[in-house]
Amino acid sequence: MLIDYVKEWMDARKQASATKEQPYKKEREHTAVFKQYTDFCHMTPEQLIEEAKQDIKATERRIVEFRHWCLESKDRPVKFNTARTNEGLIRGFYTYNSIHFSKAFKMPVPKPSGTRKTYSKLEAFNHDEQGRITGLNDVICDFLKEMNQTHKAIAFCLLTTGQKAGEILNLNVDFVYDNQGQITEKERLFLDTERVKTRFPVSVFLSKEATAELKRYVRDKRKNAKPNDPLFLEEAKHKGAPRRMSAKAISDAFRRRAQSMGLINSETKENPLDPTRFRHIFKEACDETISKEDVIKSMMGHKQGIGGTYSNYTETGLLQYYLAVEPLLSVYKGGNGNNPISVQKIEALEESLRVQHLEIMEQDKKLTDLSNIIMGYKIILTKITEQQIRLGQFTDITQLKQDKLEQKPKAAGPKKGKSSKSAGE
């Protein structure tokens, strides 16, 4: 049972967390690490705090020893960066309880991940003689084409949006529906959401190929699903009921696919085409075709700078930029390096759209003013009519119309005399 100030520290970490995506899971992980630390030290939280107040150097040595223990543990050894994260967690416990370490006691420098080195061994794109990107590597295209329908739909979404698995797997079935509850007829779906990790806004399209794959998947696999049901489900049921697909499940599926193609690095065991790799591929395609950094950040869900924070791109405006990226991410057609949509053309179209938007706003203002004038006339007419009714000039509008009809001169008809005479004859 954790004492109160440990619980308060956990609550403070939970509130300060930028993710807040699964707070209970985070708290459980933090509690497990802290319990490992107390078991390693054979001390209670009170004793740890008391020791730190009396001898901070002894506490610093304990923390370093705990990091080495995490790395060399026979039961469950962890990687260096994970051990470093655990050390940071323990440091936070002391700092929260007003224990300050010496300036010389610094966090170890994190080691670079070996995953990017593996990425570099498998080129994502083909290039022409000038070094320009011409389209996706054939290996990546084959990797995507031969997947099962569910994994293929997810992979196409990852590739053409640049998002991590969390953003795609959190979607519900209604993402593919229109306002009438039917599968949308749009050629490109628009993803307007937040990143799971940072809560930064994301605004990006799915390519025509990805949208087609996703709609095909819903028709074949999720046609009886309710709008609020998860879009992607794990194949194995959990306690007899299907559950939303996890990032680990799709990562394992990508690894199996890469292993069947012989792509797994024999030394590092890293997968060069894990779900995160497709985010790097999308970013590379954006860097090739889009010159505006704030547009790329908006699509990727990165933190905007001071200027980018106030950038407000409409869905139509973003589409013009996305159309420049889309050919480079085509799996079935491939890019040819001769993209007809230049940056200058995109900016010209954007300016034209901005002018049209201003004109529409001006016309809308005029229509609003005219509507107010008409409404004013209607109010005046209603008051006049009510006053005439009170004075007894006419009982109602219907009677007034009938009186006007009776007052109209009748059309001249044949004279009765002539008619009688004709009849007599």
Image (spheres, grey):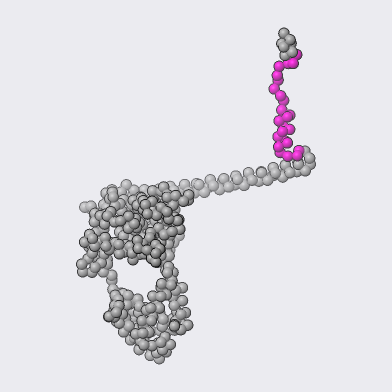
Residue at 46 percent across and 84 percent down: it is: 3
Q: Is residue 271 visible?
A: yes
Vertical relation: 8 (above or below) 20: below
Quadrant of the image for the C terminus?
Answer: top right
Q: Residue at x 30, y 76 (%)?
A: 78
In the image: residue 374, left or right of residue 232: right
Relative image position of residue 357 (x, y in whole percent):
48, 49
- Magenta span has 22? no
Closer to the camera in the image, 322 or 159? 159
* Residue that extends furthest to the bottom in the rendered view of this protein: 54
Residue 328 visible somewhere in the drawing: no
- Residue furthest front as drawn: 240
Left or right: where 70 falls relative to 95: left
Q: Is residue 255 left or right of residue 212?
A: left
Placement of 137 over or under 79, stated as above or below: above
Quarter of the rendering containing residue 149: bottom left
Can you say whether 390 is above or below 423 in the image? below
Quadrant of the drawing holding the N terminus: bottom left
Front-most of residues 119 and 239: 239
Residue 158 or 374: which is nearer the viewer?
158
Number of marks present in the image shown: 0
Residue 419, percent from left and from top:
72, 14
Q: Position of residue 386 (x, y in %)?
A: 73, 44
Residue pictured at 66% horizontal, 44% vertical: 378
What residue lies at 39% left-to-right and 54% top-to-bottom? 222
Position of residue 390 measured from the top left corner of the image (x, y, whole percent): 77, 43
Question: Was residue 415 drawn as part of the magenta stretch in this picture?
Answer: yes
Foreground: 45 or 368?
45
| The magenta segment | 394-417
